[in-house]
Amino acid sequence: TFGEGSAPFYTGMRYYENFNETMAPDDHLLIAPVAIHEDSVIHYTSTSFQVPLTAIADQDYTEGDSIYLPDPVRTLFVYNTFGKIYITRDVVVSTLSSGDWAEFNVQGRATCYEFSPDGDHLYIGTSTGRIYRISDLRTAYNKEALEALEISQLYNNSAVITDISLDTTDPDRLVASIGSYTGTNHVIYTDNATSATNDDFEGIWNAPGDLSNMPAYSVTFDVVSGNPNRVLAGTEYGIFVTDDLGNTNWVESNAGDMYRVPVYDLKQQTKTHEDNANISNEYMIYAGTFGGGLFSAGNMYVGINEVNNESNVTSLAIYPNPVSDLARVDLDLEDYSTVQLVIFDAFGKKVADLNKGKLPAGLNTLTIDAKSLASGNYILAVYVDGIRAQSGKFIVTK
């Protein structure tokens, strides 16, 4: 699009796509290349990405007839200038022009966006401390329908909204980060996002001591931890984590190669190989920093979903726990097997790989030298005959 007047230093934007949108209208125009009989299969491609599609003819068509067919491949794209945001469903269509964007007014500059997992809601944070919501996007498939939607203000504060994150398992749960050096509510939360009214939020930031005044630049739920109240925040001093929506406190979580650097963006891969067999980075968390590069971390409880429940491991025990020097591992095997112990830190970085060789059936007691491990939380993954069979958590204290 062509810029008009002054614009922000950088252009904020967000993209959403759905290859199986069931609410899309039958608006894909196909000119019948030949005569088509009722109940025959029609082959065509989607407007975006040219995905192969099929439909059953609902009547007889002659060559040259116009046929309107369903197109489930849909996208949304949003970007901003000062005081305005622009939305289109045609960003990946080559015929898109500057007149195809729906326009909405906001106070200040849009600084962050978040689409709901189903694409029905868009949340916008601004430089003037507002959070807006545009709903019913799944009913709007052209500029006119998009512009007919209402934009609602959910939150109003004086400090910039730096990031917004939704719980992908519950779209009513929303957290946002606030980037100011004043006040203490630098992470806010609501469990009523899809219908929240102004200021239907609570502050959940509870960092220790003087750190409570530092800004939060980014925020995300951890969808894999098994704890729906686990939230990560990117701050001036790296990443902080809470396990209970800040009801007790936030703790520093700069393990592995991470260090105290401003974290401006946090994103987690929420799709799994069950959604798409080509996904190999499921649950990975990415941290974009100011001047420190890009970091990635495996899920907080590494590989829970990779455990083979049909393995021949009947029990696993790690003790003492916490441990300071030498830990023992009791492993009960059903069959004679090759065993490998792999230790990960809290951010998924492999810190030890111990090959224990062939072990007999029955109870085996193994040892782990923890003296070289720093204080913190760890995951022990047990591989039996090359297959991940069991996982256990343990804590190292010094």
Image (tube, grey):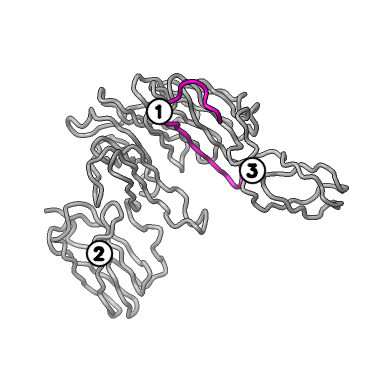
Q: Amino acid at mark 3?
A: Thr
Instruction: Look at the picture and state if 320 lies above or below 44.
Output: below
203 or 270: which is nearer to us?
270
Say if the magenta span includes residue 89.
no
- Label 1: how many Cα within 10 Å (few below 14, some 14–19, many 20+): few
366 or 332: which is nearer to us?
366
Percent of width and height locating residue 155:
41, 22
Task: For marks 3 and 2, give the CA distance.
Answer: 48 Å
Q: Earlier in the sequence, mark 1 or mark 2?
A: 1
As drawn, the label of residue 317 is 2
Q: Which residue in the protein does label 1 denote?
A: 9
Percent of width and height locating residue 380:
27, 62
| Magenta region | 1-20
Say if the magenta span includes residue 7.
yes
Q: Which residue in the protein does label 3 denote?
A: 22
Q: Amino acid at mark 1?
A: Phe
- Residue at (54, 36) in percent of width and height: 77
Q: Is residue 239 left or right of residue 59?
A: left
Q: Is residue 93 left or right of residue 118?
A: right
Is disc 2 placed on a helix, strand or loop?
Answer: strand
Q: Amino acid at mark 2?
A: Ala
Q: Earlier in the sequence, mark 3 or mark 1?
A: 1
Percent of width and height locating residue 357:
27, 77
In this rendering, which labeled residue sits more in front, label 3 or label 2?
A: 3
- Label 2: how many Cα within 10 Å (few below 14, some 14–19, many 20+): some
Instruction: Give the dominant element type of the magenta stretch: helix, strand or loop.
Output: loop
Instruction: Look at the picture and state if 262 lies above or below 341.
Output: above
